[in-house]
Amino acid sequence: MNMALLVRPPIGFAAAAGPVAVAVATIVATAAPASAEGVTISASTAYCVGSTYTLTLPAADATILIGNVPWQNAFAFQTRATGDSAFNIVATAPYVAGKDVVATWTPTAAGEFMTSAWPYSTDRGLSNFGENGPTVTVVQTAPAGATCTPPTAGNGGTGSASSIPVIGGLLSSLSAQK
């Protein structure tokens, strides 16, 4: 079966290695929702096994995707572990014209996971194309200074720069030098 993806450029610093990569990914996630201008995942200072995160496919993207397969009536949100060739369906959500498609994901294993959303129906299964979202690193427990819980609505972005792991002190000193 041939598969095609609507691919968006990845975010973060995929070329970074070792502990720095985790810290950089954590910093990117605190600034705004991890987004590839398509599928997004709720912002969190750490993505952890057993915690629940919201996956969203914007209404405009959903309309374009479903327009190619009008017999599909839902979307399957999937994850794929780095180095693995198989996607795993983690949630399905109905398509409603003009509305974002939203589902939740609770990671069950640590590792690096790419998220995606593909048109879907219970009688026909998955379409042979979809839209990739961000890749996130899932850990067993949050590193020092981070939390596994995404901020609640109205609570994001109001913290101190000094609370950001690794570079918080630098950011605070730069903002003090106005």
Image (cartoon, rainbow, N blue to C red):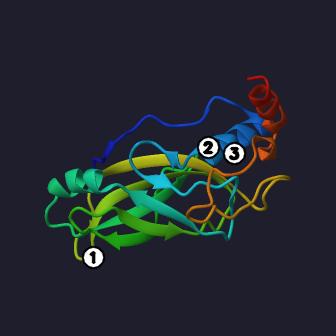
Residue at the image point whose x is 75% and y is 41% from the top: 161
- First reached walking from the N terminus: tag 2 or tag 3: 3
Q: Nearer the viewer, residue 109 or 25?
A: 25
Residue type highlighted by circle 3: Thr
Chain-order first, disc 3 or disc 1: 3
The residue that disc 2 covers is: 31
Single out the mark in the foreground, 1 or 2: 2
Q: Are marks 2 and 3 in contact (CB under 8 Å)?
A: no
Q: Position of residue 98 (x, y in %)?
A: 23, 61
Q: Is residue 156 above or below residue 165?
A: below
Residue 26, label in figure: 3
93 relative to 172 in the view: left or right: left
Give the Cα distance between marks 3 and 1: 36 Å
Give residue 138's position: percent from left, percent from top: 67, 56
**Nearer to us: label 2 or label 3:** 2
Q: Quadrant of residue 148?
A: bottom right
Evaluate whether residue 128 shows in this view.
no
Camera-side mark, 3 or 1: 3
* Residue 93 appearing in the image: yes
Along the line of sight, which residue is nearer the eye, 92 or 43?
43
Q: Is residue 153 left or right of residue 129?
A: right
Please name the residue that numbered disc 1 is placed on.
Answer: 122
